Amino acid sequence: GAVRVGINRRERKDDGRLVLGQHPEGALDSEVQVWRFDAADGEAPTPGAPVGWVRRGADPVAVLVHYACHGVSLSSQIRLMSADFMGVMREVVERLVSGTALYVQGACGNINPSLMGPDWDHPRRLGNALGAEAARVALLAEPVDGLPLRAAREALALPGLLPVSLEAGRERVTRLEAERERLDRDGVPDGAGSRVWNTRTLERARRGLAALEGGEPLPPVAAEIGALRIGEVALVSNPTELFCEIGMAIKKASPFPWTAVAGYTDGSAGYVPTRAAYPEGGYEVERACRVNPEAGEMIEETSVRLLKELREG
């Protein structure tokens, strides 16, 4: 299925700054992929039965919903615990289809919800839209064989993020040090978000500059790639916030008719933008990235190779 719950968030302002906003023309993976697992001894739904009605014993055991969008529709002003729009989606699917609804987060490093702000109506609207589409797909799903069942893993050592040049590295350190001094003058406490991000980013910038100047090399960033085959469907995972373009490229190159790409899995390696995004800058590159531009290509190549091995094995 497909739904436009998310939107590309890398907005370019008139003054040239790239901010976390909305970029409607930017890349977006709108695919909603649904895997429905039925009990092996259940009876099939009666043709022509009302939507959501199944014979006794035929209830789905689980419905796995795969989509790519940050779960931040309430934004940071809300201090309460929430499952955001994914929680609403699960309630919709469980009510209309039955079984346990599970959410698998896709490659959404540059994708935010299209509705954001301290308004509880946002997760309701987005979750109902995603849940309705997922339920439609689940109710009309066609059965496929659950065999063969295979899995594979491979550990990657992603290269640490280095400045593009000594000049650029020194300028970045100087700018972040000036930012820290401003935070000191303004009395921003240590636990504040701006202080935390400045500290982390400045430490990485200093290490990267030192490595480029001939000091201690940066340690690689560990990332384990996993792949699972269930018959004609596959799931490939990585521990990063992968940009959606890389996730879509993996799905396109996969030898399986249905492939889900799960980020945020088996660790936390930070953001992995596309190579083209690095010179553009922005939060994902400048604040939350720990790896060099070739990291995305390494994850894509390894993911596709593992999928092909599962297909051929």
Image (cartoon, rainbow, N blue to C red):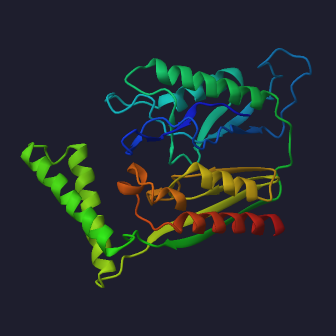
Residue 75 visible in the current orientation: yes
Q: Is residue 46 left or right of residue 182?
A: right
What is the x, y in percent for residue 160? 41, 71
Q: Is residue 239 left or right of residue 313?
A: left
Where is 258 relative to 143, above or below? below
Q: Quadrant of residue 89?
A: top right
What is the x, y in percent for residue 75? 38, 31
Residue 59 visible in the current orientation: no
What is the x, y in percent for residue 262? 60, 51
Where is 313 relative to 38, above or below? below
Q: Quadrant of residue 175?
A: bottom left
Q: Quadrant of the C terminus?
A: bottom right
Check the image and name the residue furthest to the top.
50
Check the image and name the residue furthest to the front.
15
Q: Residue at x 75, y 26 (%)?
A: 136
* Camera-nearest residue between 208 and 219: 208
Q: Residue at x 82, y 52 (%)?
A: 232
Q: How many marks?
A: 0
Where is 38 relative to 238, above or below? above
Q: Is residue 151 left or right of residue 257?
A: left
What is the x, y in percent for residue 90? 59, 29
* Camera-nearest residue between 46 and 56: 46
* Camera-nearest residue between 199 and 186: 186
Q: Quadrant of the N terminus?
A: top right
Q: Residue at x 40, y 39 (%)?
A: 13
